[in-house]
Image: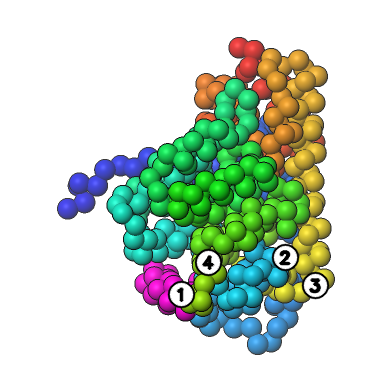
Amino acid sequence: NADVVPQAPEDALFGLMAAYRRDTDPKKVDLGIGAYRDNNAKPWVLPVVKKADELLRKDPDLNHEYLPIAGLAAFTSASQKLILGDESPAILEKRATSVQTISGTGALHLGALFLSKFYHTKEPRTVYFSDPTWPNHFQVFSNVHLPYKTYPYFKKETKALDFDGMISTLEGAEPGSIIVLHACAHNPTGVDPTQDQWKKIADVIREKKHFPFFDTAYQGFASGDLAKDGWAIRYFVEQGFELCIAQSYAKNFGLYGERAGCFHFVTASAADAESTVQRVASQLAILQRSEISNPPAYGARIAATVLNDKELFADWEADLKTMSGRIIDMRKALRSKLEELGTPGTWNHITDQIGMFSYTGLSEKQVLKLREDSHVYMTKNGRISMAGLNTNNVEYFAKAVDKAVRE
Ligand code: LMR
């Protein structure tokens, strides 16, 4: 009897989006969901995506048949190269297998489900998330009954990485724990480890025989350079780890609603690596078939068209620079406006942090005040999506923050 079903809370982020839409004030500012906006606060269809779309529509053989269970091969193989690098030993030695998924969330789910079935270490197989992390991580992994804990990540006092806290928690974690890592442009903080810090993280993960699981939703968004943003993953692969990767094309292709993503499993170099990967692939195919049968085609076709064509790829890199460049400009503008206003506190973290988000340090009370008084919408943890700022509203936002901070 459905009487027993309790009311669930509304999703915080999508609830915020709905509240913003209901607000009729013309001054309203949306800094909630992580979706790129142009300087007029409008969604931006990447010019390269428009081009690929036109090419696809011209193809007389295009149809709506099912894709294979593992997805479009031209997409999954290009996705491997994009994240692991063209010359990755894992690709050359056939140590990687990939499945097209319902964007990054679907990739996380498929990976979590796979680990819940096959990751046989001593119970409990705890998953570690950064504190804070993208809230959906908790739901995705607990849905498949993997217990979770967190490792310190953000230090309030410095508004930067709590590296020592992170390392000591990973050192103290039960050996064989699953460690979820944001490959770049950490969500929600915008704070990433340096390359030297990544090396130390890899050392601890190796010593403790932990299992790394990378979430990459912002490749090309952090630095504007795809290889640089893929560095941490490539380093771990080079170091011989067995690992999982959940890859999203929502942000870097602006394909939010098309749900294009990929799950990758990479095994370590060994004589039987190829057969290991084939067995893993066979299990992933069964999981995929039972859950979504086969993935949606459109977004993957767009991405594959671009990723497999030199000229379009270069166009895409230019589009990424447009997006990341505008965000960097907004970081500079926001920081300098706050400093000009003499807003209490320090604001260097706004330009130190990278990617789509900034963790402002504003309290929940200040966030709610900003919504009430100034119609500014941001998540309660003080995260802002930098892409919601533009030359028309950055001053308005800075003044609103100034007011909220002084109260
Ligand atoms: C975000 O954190 O805003 C995005 O990743 C969107 C989402 O699905 O939560």
Q: Say if the magenta span includes residue 376.
A: no
Q: Position of residue 344 (x, y in %)?
A: 69, 14
Q: Is residue 115 above or below residue 156?
A: below
Q: Position of residue 300 (x, y in %)?
A: 61, 70
Task: Compute the Cα span from label 1 to label 4.
Answer: 10 Å
- Residue type for callout 2: Val
| Occupied quadrant, residue 89 | bottom right
Q: Secondary structure at mark 1?
A: helix
The crowd level at tag 3 (other Cα within 10 Å; few <14, some 14-19, many 20+) is few
**Viewer-nearest of labels 4 and 2?**
4
Q: Which mark is residue 49?
A: 2
Considering every residue shown, the one lying at the far top of the view is 407
Q: Which mark is residue 276?
A: 1
Task: Compute the Cα span from label 3 to label 1.
Answer: 33 Å
Label tally:
4
Q: Is mark 1 within 8 Å of ligand 1?
A: no
Q: Name the one closer to the observer, 400 or 73.
A: 73
**Viewer-nearest of labels 3 and 1?**
1
- Residue type for callout 1: Thr
Q: Is residue 302 above or below residue 161?
A: below
Q: Earlier in the sequence, mark 1 or mark 4?
A: 4
Q: Is residue 40 visible?
A: no
Q: Which residues are magenta?
A: 275-298
Q: Position of residue 138 (x, y in %)?
A: 42, 46
On the image, numbered disc 3 is attached to which residue? 310
- Residue type for callout 4: Ala
Residue at 64 percent across and 38 percent down: it is 191
Q: Say if the magenta span includes residue 289.
A: yes
Q: Is residue 110 above or below residue 383?
A: below
